[in-house]
Image (cartoon, rainbow, N blue to C red):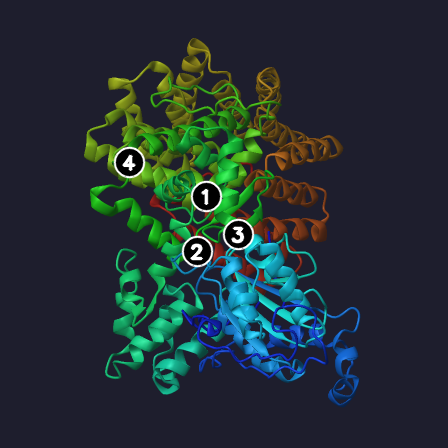
Amino acid sequence: MHSPQPWVLGASAAVGALGSAFSLLATGVLQGNSAGGAASGPVTPMVTHQLPAIPDHFTGRWELVKHIRRQVLGPGLPDRWRRHLGRRGAGRRGRLRMVLLWGRGGVGKTALAVRLGHELAHDFPDGQIYVDLRGASGTTPRAPADVLTVLLRDLGVDPSAIPEDLDDRTRLFRSRTAGLRLLIVLDNALDEAQIRPLLPGTSTSLVIVTSRPRLSGLEGGTSFELTALEHAQAVELLGKLAGFDRVAAEPTAASQIVHACGLLPLAVRIAGARLAGRPGWPLENFALRLVSQHRRLGELRAGGLDVRASIAVGYHAQPAANQRAFLLLALCDAPAFSVLPLQAAMDCTRTRAEECMDELAAAQMLEWLGNNAAGESVYRYHDLVRDYAVELLTAEGLGREAHRAELGRIVGHCLHLADSAERRIAPGSHRPSAGFPRWSPPPEDGDAVTEPDALRQLAAEYEFLLCVVREALDAGMTAAASELASLLAAYQDTRALWSDWEQTQHAVLEACRAGGDEWGAGVSLRDLAVLRRLQGRLSEAEQHGLDALAIFERCGEPADTADCLSNLGWLYRVRGERDRAHTYLTRALDVADACGIPRTRGWVLQMRADLEIDAGNLDAALTLLNQSRETFDGIADSRGLGWTLRIMGDVYRQQEQYDRALAQYEAAVDLLRAHGDRRGIARIVDAIGALHQSMGQAQAAVRHYEDSLAAFRQLGDLQWQAYTLDALADLYAGAGETERAESCRTEAGAVLAGLADGMARAQPARRL
């Protein structure tokens, strides 16, 4: 991700529409040829000071001011030497002679430029010049030729001697400024073409340029990106305007206000000004007014300062295609996004979508955050810019409904991605026919674009896909949301993302029930049943599983019941109900074989092997596990194979074939690590602890148990926390550490008490 330079600290709000002092003043009078030729004698300028006043509430840029000052004046050059060096010192080689300050509107570029100008004024005694180029003012940018006319008049050139041609004016300007020590502030530049004719030809002057885009095409300049304020600086700025005592009296509300302002200096300045004008207003009340996304921009307006107007300048400067892209990206309330959703929404080539996003980022309408795990560029809106985009999207009764086709393509893209990844995570699963149309990108012109790795892409886009589930539900696309949520469950299971899994499925289940989508409700209940079983909430898992099974038996296909049956069988085995477990697992295996669902077959064979291990039938368990291994090998399901090898290790451990057991565990870890399966790896670490315990290696056993316990706590796996605590208690008791043993038993009891009532009868064997 992009990391700002250490001096990018934030500042007070921009000075605002300061205007050009040149349009009113003609104070730089030079002696010489009034016709614009070479001076006939020494040029002695009348010093002009055109910088606007220093902003009263300048905040947070001091490190950057110091850094630029060192760059301009040169390292280690005392003031007394600099005064004696005169003109020769001012042109000393290696010093900075053009400072480019760039960043989004309202971030404080003008304020910093003016502050720098005043800090450096005495080092440029021949004059300080300020020009507002109006490149980001919402009005017509000033033409270089018009600006040069004013500059040349101020330099003493007779108006009748100013050439018509732009190149001639530029040469005359450079001739007139040669050798002078001038400080020139060119504020609100549009682009490089506007700036180039206005640059002096020698290095004795300093030029400070501000712009929204980065003007990387200007040679010889050093760029400094200005970003939002740090939190403490934003609060300080608010205090300077609203009163430090008020801010100190309500620190929580002050923090909420500056965060609602997105830490943008202009917005904080406006908030402070509004509070200053209402000394009786509690900060908490104003913070509440800023909470609403649809109201916030209206609140951030005071006098001639307006956040909405500042953002609108950038938006209206964009071509129509970029304006459309800017709005479509707001269809999903995601914290960040790659180019892929925009490509789907616009139904265009990747190249075209990348061009739009790059141009929006260059114009400071988007922020580039760096590259994600898949190597894709990632962008975000600033919070207030998002507010503006949502405003436009919902203006005049428009919004998501008016853009349903575009949102549908985004959903279709996410389904295509999740479907491709799920086939990698869980090959050989039962997959109902796709209900919602997938979106695939159109072919690119020229060289073909390599299809990204689906698993890596899903990991990189996961947060965005969660947002799309919510947006699809809000848009009434319940079936699509249900399908996407179910496809994500395999990834959430692998990565133990239980909180996301629960929240997503509950939202989908509620929507399906409200909309009368019984089959969709069954899918959510089935997936929630698996989650509840993993969490150890067995009563809920049983109820969800039975409800889902009843729905599928009533309105689904036989294949839909397979995973419900297998999960119920596993649940009953965990609860120690061997006969019921055997019944449901047998039914699941019959359905899997009849309907051709090899993945379910592989997992059921694992569970059947568990039952045999519980009964002490180790040879029978190995036979079932070998069948499971062959099944997973046949569909290239390396994760399923990893879990099978783990259980084979348990069998060898009980047979006291410790070397073979360890070899199985190590092979299983390698397979599960490739999938990022933290839960599976934690189980294996725990099993290795049991292996050391069986071998009488107590210290090694404790070390592995403690490692696995830490992992189970991080995962929120209460069931296995309890099992591991019991094992540690036994080891501590055997070592005579009575207090530690009792502490572990007490904690294990508390953990089990926090689970559903079904855990009271859970199978105590450590092999679960």
Determine whether 336 is above or below 545 in the image: below
Q: Secondary structure at mark 3?
A: helix
Mark 2 and mark 1: Cα distance apart in space: 18 Å
Amino acid type, label 4 = Leu
The percent position of residue 673, horizontal first and vertical second, equals: 64, 37
Residue of label 2: 382
**Residue 208 left/right relative to 489:** right
Question: Which residue is at the front of the view, 279 or 714?
Answer: 279
Mark 3 and mark 1: Cα distance apart in space: 20 Å
Residue of label 4: 509
Question: Which residue is at the front of the view, 119 or 703?
Answer: 119
Mark 3 neighbour density, 10 Å: few (under 14) some (14–19) many (20 or more): few
The percent position of residue 517, horizontal first and vertical second, equals: 23, 27
Farthest-out residue, top: 594
**Residue 273 left/right relative to 644:** left
Amino acid type, label 1 = Glu
Q: Secondary structure at mark 2?
A: loop
Residue of label 3: 714
Amino acid type, label 2 = His
Mark 3 and mark 4: Cα distance apart in space: 27 Å
Q: Are marks 4 and 1 in contact (CB under 8 Å)?
A: no
Upstream in the sequence, badge 3 or badge 1? 1
Residue of label 1: 463
Residue for point 34% across, 60% down: 309
Upstream in the sequence, badge 4 or badge 1? 1
